[in-house]
Amino acid sequence: MSIFANNFLYAIASILDKILWAYMWLIIIRALISWVNPDPYNPIVRFLIKVTEPVLYFVRRKLSLTRYCGHTCGLSSYVHCYHG
């Protein structure tokens, strides 16, 4: 491969890494906000839901809810962050 191709692939990988890193933080923020019962009409909350819901919906479909000590726990945000 030429130097141009190597630099181009490195640039694409670097940009993709930064995008996935930012997306991971959006999911973490959404998980944290969900613990405090946020206002669904807040523009920030609406943005977080709109951006993260497609991935979390896909993970929820693939991973059914898990029963833990008699309670149902949704694990979709954790799975994406640790395996994404």
Image: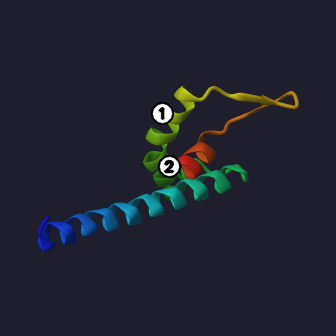
Closer to the camera: disc 2 or disc 1?
2
Residue 55 at x, y = what percent?
Answer: 46, 41
Q: Describe residue 75's horizontal placement relative to residue 23 as left or right.
A: right
Which residue is most to the right?
69
- Residue at the disc numbered 1: 58
Sequence-earlier tag: 2 or 1: 1
Residue at coordinates 59% horizontally, 53% vertically from top-left? 30
| Secondary structure category for the residue under label 2 | loop
Q: Is residue 25 above or below residue 82?
A: below
Coloration mode: rainbow
Looking at the image, which residue is at 26% across and 63% down? Answer: 12
Which of the image's four quarters has the N terminus?
Answer: bottom left
Question: Could you say where residue 61 lies in the image, as x and y percent from the top left?
Answer: 53, 27
**Disc 1 secondary structure class:** helix
Q: Which mark is residue 84?
A: 2
**Where 52 falls versus 14 (above or below)?**
above
Q: Which mark is residue 26?
A: none
Q: Residue 7 versus residue 81: which sits nearer the camera? A: 7
What residue is rendered at 58% in x and 47% in y?
40
Q: Residues within 10 Å of mark 2 (few under 14, many from 20)?
A: few
Question: 34 above or below 14?
Answer: above
Residue nearest the viewer, comparing 18 with 71: 18
The amino acid type found where label 1 is placed reads Phe
Q: Amino acid at mark 2?
A: Gly
Q: Is residue 52 toward the left or the right of residue 35 in the image?
A: left
Cα–Cα gap, marks 2 and 1: 13 Å
Disc 2 and disc 1 in contact, CB within 8 angstroms: no
Residue 31 is situated, as x and y percent measured from the top left of the image, at: 64, 51
As drawn, is 62 to the left or to the right of 74?
A: left
Residue, x 60% and y 56% (percent of image)?
A: 28
Total residue callouts: 2
